[in-house]
Amino acid sequence: MRETSIWQRLAEQKALDPGLRGEIEAAFGTRGKKALAAIDDGKVIRYLDFFVVEGRTSNYIVEDDFCTCSDFLYRGRTCWHLLAVRIALTTGTYRSVDGWYQDQMRNSSR
């Protein structure tokens, strides 16, 4: 199945059923599996200013079609963090924080 139909179906359904999960994994491989796992584990967080995806070694800021991970920055391709945010945003499966991520970063560096 084509990638565009995955996003169309996801937008229509607003939910991840087993068939759609399988299509995501087939279309995106390891990146799709990691994105779905991040959603399942509650690692996609929406702050007032950014989405943040908690990775194994760091947190990654995602905004629009940009991610701070090295896969995106150095290889210039869609990373699993971007996929996770896109899926989570469409389905509403993310945690919300009523605060600014920039403030959290500033406070943690003190």
Image (cartoon, helix red, strand yellow):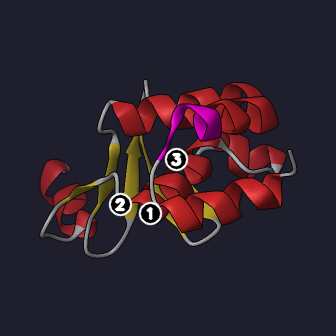
Is-magenta flag for residue 33? no
The x and y percentages for residue 12 are 56, 67
The x and y percentages for residue 63 are 51, 69
Circle number at residue 84: 3
- Given contact means CB atoms under 8 Å apart, are the residues at marks 1 and 2 in contact? yes
Extent of the magenta region: 16-21
Tell me which amino acid carries mark 2: Gly
Is-magenta flag for residue 20? yes
In this picture, residue 108 sits left or right of residue 49: left
Tell me which amino acid carries mark 1: Leu
> Which residue is at a point 57% across and 72% down the rendered structure image?
64
The vertical placement of 83 against 56, above or below, is below
Circle number at residue 8: none
Q: Quadrant of the N terminus?
A: top right
The x and y percentages for residue 37 are 46, 28
For the residue labelled by badge 1, is the local secondary structure a helix, a strand or a loop?
Answer: helix
Q: Name the residue beneath numbered marker 1.
A: 89
Circle number at residue 92: 2
Tell me which amino acid carries mark 3: Ala
Label 2 vs 3, first from the N-terminus: 3
The vertical placement of 87 against 34, above or below, is below
Label 3 vs 1, first from the N-terminus: 3
